[in-house]
């Protein structure tokens, strides 16, 4: 039986989490697959996947959001097959930034200018869809460090926007 890997949170800050991975077995490990999950504004679950080579590993994941719950799951790839999943939860330190105030204005039938307020030197994600279900499951999206972006949309549709 292949045991799940041990995920140990080494440290965390406002914008990063460091963790180690190891196996408590003599089975040869070729690497790990790690998923980091978080929920964006209760509408959309985000995920970042890391593929890590080697037996032991300490990883640092950066560009995270302050005071946000993250779930880290991992499994090991071994000579005998994949291990079961392990999970840990951690909340980054600091104060969560205020939600930006979004304004969306149609420029013409196929372009919408989105602008918002918020801190400088961060990356914003803009999500848009024609329904709440699509906004949750598979929205169109773009990222920028600016405070505005023009997105192209289909004519004769109504859209929901989230930044």
Image (tube, rainbow, N blue to C red):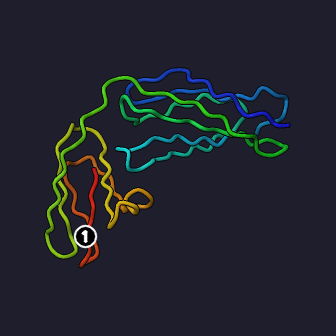
The x, y position of residue 117, in whole percent, is: 16, 43
Is residue 94 positioned above or below 38 on the image? above
| Residue in the picture at 27% in, 61% down | 160
Question: 10 Å neighbourhood of mark 1: few (<14), some, or many (≥20)?
Answer: few
Measuring 62% from the left and 26% from the top, which residue is drawn there?
20
Residue lying furthest front: 132
Q: Residue furthest bottom?
A: 156
**Residue found at x 48% / y 34%:** 70
Q: Quadrant of residue 29?
A: top right
Q: Quadrant of the N terminus?
A: top right
Q: In the image, what residue occupies the spot 15% across and 67% down?
A: 106
Q: Give the residue number, with chain letter if any, for mark 1.
A: 158
Q: Position of residue 136 (x, y in %)?
A: 41, 56
Q: Secondary structure at mark 1?
A: loop
In this figure, what is the number of numbered marks?
Answer: 1
Q: Is residue 15 left or right of residue 22?
A: left
Q: Residue furthest top?
A: 11
Q: Left or right: where does residue 99 sit relative to residue 2?
A: left
Image coordinates for residue 104, horizontal then vertical, percent: 17, 59
Left or right of 10, for residue 152: left
- Residue 143, image x, y percentages: 32, 52
Q: Quadrant of residue 155?
A: bottom left
């Amino acid at each position: 039986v292949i045991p799940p890997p041990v995920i140990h949170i080494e440290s965390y800050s406002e914008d990063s989490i460091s963790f180690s991975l190891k196996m408590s077995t003599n089975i040869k490990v070729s690497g790990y697959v790690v998923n980091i999950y978080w929920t964006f504004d209760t509408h959309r679950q985000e995920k970042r996947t890391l593929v890590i080579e080697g037996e032991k590993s300490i990883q640092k994941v950066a560009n995270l959001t302050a005071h946000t719950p993250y779930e880290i799951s991992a499994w090991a790839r071994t000579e005998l097959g994949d291990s079961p999943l392990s999970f840990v939860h951690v909340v980054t330190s600091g104060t969560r930034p205020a939600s930006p105030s979004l304004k969306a204005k149609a420029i013409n039938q196929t372009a919408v200018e989105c602008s918002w307020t918020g801190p400088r030197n961060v990356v914003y994600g803009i999500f848009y869809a024609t329904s709440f279900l699509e906004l949750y499951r598979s929205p169109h999206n773009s990222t920028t460090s600016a405070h505005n972006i023009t997105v192209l949309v289909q004519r004769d549709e109504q859209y929901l926007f989230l930044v």
